[in-house]
Image (cartoon, rainbow, N blue to C red):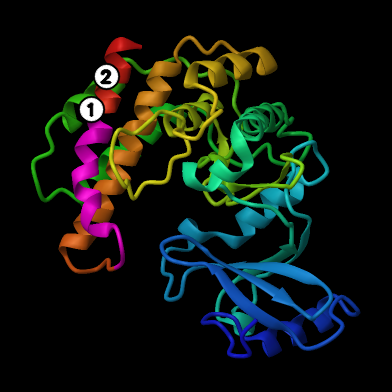
Amino acid sequence: MSTVPPPGLDPEQLRAHLDRVRPGLVAGPLKARLIEGGRSNLTYVVTDGTGQWVVRRPPLGHVLATAHDMKREHRVISALHPTAVPVPEPVLLCEDESVLGSPFYVMEYVAGTPYRTAEQLAPIGAERTRAAVLALVDTLVELHAVDAEAVGLGDFGRPDGFLDRQLRRWGKQLDASRNRDLAGIDELHAALGRALPVSPAPTVVHGDYRLDNVLIGDDDRIKAVLDWEMSTLGDPLTDLGLLVMYSAKLEVADSPVSTTAGAAGHPSPAELIERYAAGSGRDTSAISWYTAFAWFKLAVILEGIHYRYTLGQTVGAGFDRIGELVPVFIEHGLTTLQEG
C-alpha cells in the first residue's frame, strides 16, 4: 500500500482513535488505500501489516446526512451479523467528526470477489457461474426470512405505503434531471402507478441487491453482502425485481452499466424467480411489475448521470454514452409491464 494517505482518511488519527476505544486491536502503524469512490460512500482497506479492516465514510464534501448515514449502515450489519445472512463483523461506529472529518464505521475485512461483468466471470466457467448466481438468490431468501423485530430492526423503515412512496420518490428524481424529451418515460411511470401491486408482509430489504454487491469466495459461496446504504423495511419483491432486471441481457455493445447476464451458465430470470418463490414461499406472480419498476428506477438514475454530464459535472470514461442507454431501459420497462 502507498505511504501517502488517501483523501478522507488519516491513518494516524484513525490509529489513535482505535487505540482509545479498542486498545490492542491494532499492532502497528496503519496504512490505507481507497478501494471505492465516486457517488457512493467511500470504502478503504486499512492494515497494520498483520490485520486488515475496512472503513466506510461518506463522500468528501457530503452535505446530505440522510443519504450517507453511517449509523444506519452500521446498525443493519450489526443486527444481521448473528443471523444466517453473511455480512462483515462490525468493529465500531464513530460519530465524532473530529477524527476523520465525518462519521465512519470500521468492520472486518472479508476476502472475496465482486463480479461486475460477464468477462470477469468467464475464467470460472459456466458451472461455477451458475452456482454463484443461484447462491445470490438463496442469500436473498435468507435476508427476507430475518425477523426484523427479533434482531432490533422493527423500526428500521416505514413499510406502509412503501411502493407508492418509492414510485413518487423516483418520479421526483426524474423531474429534477429533466432537460430533454424521453419518449415513454412518463407513460411507464403512470402505468406503474395504475398497476401498483399489494405488497407482501414487509422484510428487511437491501435496496441494491446484485452480484457486484456481494463477495464470492474461492469456493463460490457468498462470503459477505455489502453496500447496505439503501436498506430499509419494505417490500421484499423490490429486491427480487432488481435482481431479475440485472439478470436480463442488455443488447447494447460495450454498455457502461455492469451486467453479468451474458456469462456462460448464468441462470435465466425465470429460473431465479422460480428459485426465490420455492425458497421463500412468497407469491411472485406480480414480479413483472417489480422488474418494470427496477427498469424505471435505473432509467431515472442513468438520466440523472447524463444530466450532470451535460452540465460538465461528471467526467470519466463511459459517461458520454449513458444518455443513449436511457431509452433502452425505458423500452425494457414498458415491454416487461405489458408482456408480464
Label 1 packing within 10 angstroms: few (<14), some (14-19), many (20+): some
Residue type (three-letter) at the residue carrying disc 1: Glu
Contact check, label 1 and label 2, Cβ < 8 Å: yes
Specify the amino acid type for callout 2: Thr
Confirm whether the magenta stretch covers residue 323. yes
Residue of label 1 = 331
Which labelled disc corresponds to residue 335?
Answer: 2
Q: Is residue 5 visible?
A: yes
* Residue 326 or residue 227, whichever sits in front: 326
Q: Which residues are magenta?
A: 316-330
As helix, strand or loop, the secondary structure at mark 2 comes to helix
Q: Residue at x 21, y 58 (%)?
A: 320
Residue 154 rendering spot, x and y as whole percentages: 68, 36
Q: Quadrant of residue 333?
A: top left
The residue located at (52%, 27%) in the rendering is 240
Q: Is residue 296 left or right of residue 243?
A: left
**In the rendered view, does 207 fall on the left or right side of 217?**
left
User: What residue do we see at 87% from left, 83% from top?
Assistant: 27
Q: Position of residue 54 (x, y in %)?
A: 69, 66
In whole angstroms, how far apart are the C-alphas of marks 1 and 2?
6 Å
- Neighbourhood count class around disc 2 (C-alpha, 10 Å): few under 14, some 14–19, many 20 upward: some
